[in-house]
């Protein structure tokens, strides 16, 4: 455990924002983390760096959680229980599960980031959310340096949301996540339009886990920029939920508005559609831009600062508020 000074964080955040950490340490074991917590209480955590927008240098000690390891806890007739340490790369873990014929995560292929942060925003894609397979999250309580276990219920999962973003925000360091996956009777979710269409095109009628994963990877690659090539943090905004009354009024003006009912009185509208209708899709302001194929994704073409990306986000929010009377909520964690 060596503390380094004046380290660029460009390689540690998928937006590729070049800010500096005054001090930086990489933690590779649970023991090291507990040792660190004995002397340091005020630090800035980074893991996969895939859901944050850094807008300035970090004065605190930056702690990279790089604890690796996966263990099989037990097996039952049709399921396997696994515990995965926080520093494992999410997509590599998903691919490993598919190779073992463990089902449940295939729709979540190619999501950037690490296992340890997947519960925080309850990552989701193509009709599946990670909360459907999580049995337990373990975390070190910063104040007491004790390991605490959160059951699935205790995590209070919601759409892109959990207790770790709310009641206990910044009080814990997530160290491992446990999953229950299927080993035989896999429950596949293919109803999401794009997956069904792709499978039909390939004439696949009884898809395997790998077929689904490959399809999701192909869809994501066709729409979403690869952070290794163009800096980004996936969806920058949440899909807003509006009242049915407001929706019906909007639909009169915009008959093609895509919509997903959430309850009898509420409707979810894709933020990407709102951004596109506001004329921002594919636009570029210096090195900050809106992706040309998915307007929900803000991108860094090279040397954009976090502030420039944030200013672009604010410009989009203002326009959408004026045009549609909808407030877009930012989904990524803005570090200001
Ligand atoms: N749309 C547009 N213009 C765009 C983008 C989308 O009109 O530029 C419309 C599409 O035509 C479609 C609708 O919006 O009718 C929904 O688009 P899409 O299926 O691409 O999904 P999304 O709602 O934009 C959500 C997640 C993604 C996830 C996909 C697939 C959020 C905030 N985003 O996007 O998650 O991959 O569904 O399930 O919920 C992420 O969180 O980083 C992420 C990429």
Image (tube, rainbow, N blue to C red):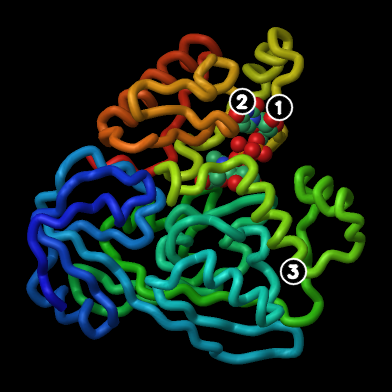
Asked if the residues shown at circle 2 and circle 1 are in contact, with their CB atoms under 8 angstroms apart, the answer is yes
Does the image show residue 267? Answer: no
Task: Judge left or right: residue 108 versus residue 163.
Answer: right
Question: Which residue, given by chain and number where applicable, does mark 2 sit on?
Answer: 273
Q: Is residue 280 above or below residue 259?
A: above
Question: Which residue, given by chain and number where applicable, does mark 1 sit on?
Answer: 258
Does the image show residue 236? Answer: yes
On residue 209, the disc is 3
Q: Nearer the viewer, residue 9 or 315?
A: 9
Q: Please state the horizontal and vertical placement of residue 313, each as a whole percent of the image.
A: 39, 26
Q: Please state the horizontal and vertical placement of residue 303, each as a whole percent of the image.
A: 29, 36
Q: Nearer the viewer, residue 208 or 10?
A: 10
- Mark 1 nearby-residue class (10 Å; few <14, some 14–19, many ≥20): few
Q: Is residue 244 above or below residue 132?
A: above
The kind of secondary structure element at disc 3 is helix
Number of numbered discs overlaid on the protein picture: 3
Say which residue appears at 54% left-offset and 23% top-offset: 281
Q: How far separated are the C-alphas under marks 2 and 3?
A: 30 Å
């Amino acid at each position: 455990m060596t503390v380094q000074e004046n380290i660029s964080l460009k390689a540690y955040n998928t937006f590729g924002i070049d800010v500096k950490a005054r001090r930086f340490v990489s933690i590779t074991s649970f023991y090291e983390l507990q040792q660190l917590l004995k002397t340091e209480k005020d630090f800035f955590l980074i893991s996969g760096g895939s859901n944050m927008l850094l807008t300035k240098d970090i004065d605190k000690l930056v702690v990279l959680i790089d604890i690796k390891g996966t263990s099989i806890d037990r097996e039952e007739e049709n399921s396997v229980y696994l515990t995965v340490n926080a520093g494992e790369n999410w997509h590599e873990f998903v691919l490993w599960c598919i190779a073992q014929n463990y089902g449940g995560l295939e729709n979540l292929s190619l999501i950037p980031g690490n296992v340890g942060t997947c519960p925080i925003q309850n990552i989701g894609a193509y009709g599946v959310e990670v909360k459907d397979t999580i049995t337990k999250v373990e975390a070190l309580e910063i104040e007491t340096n004790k390991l605490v276990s959160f059951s699935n219920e205790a995590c209070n999962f919601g759409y892109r949301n959990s207790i770790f973003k709310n009641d206990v925000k910044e009080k814990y360091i997530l160290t491992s996540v446990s999953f229950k996956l299927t080993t035989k009777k896999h429950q596949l979710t293919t109803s999401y339009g794009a997956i069904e269409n792709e499978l039909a095109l390939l004439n696949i009628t009884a898809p395997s886990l790998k077929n689904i994963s490959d399809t999701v990877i192909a869809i994501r690659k066709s729409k979403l920029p690869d952070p290794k090539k163009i800096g980004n943090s996936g969806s920058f905004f949440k899909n807003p939920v509006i009242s049915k009354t407001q929706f019906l009024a909007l639909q009169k003006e915009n008959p093609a508005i895509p919509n997903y009912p959430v309850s009898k009185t509420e409707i979810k509208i894709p933020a990407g559609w709102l951004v596109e209708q506001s004329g921002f899709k594919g636009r570029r302001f210096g090195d900050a831009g809106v992706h040309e194929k998915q307007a929900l994704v803000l991108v860094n073409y090279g040397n954009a600062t976090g502030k420039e990306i944030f200013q672009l986000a604010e410009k989009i929010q203002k326009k959408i508020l004026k045009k549609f009377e909808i407030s877009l909520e930012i989904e990524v964690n803005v570090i200001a």
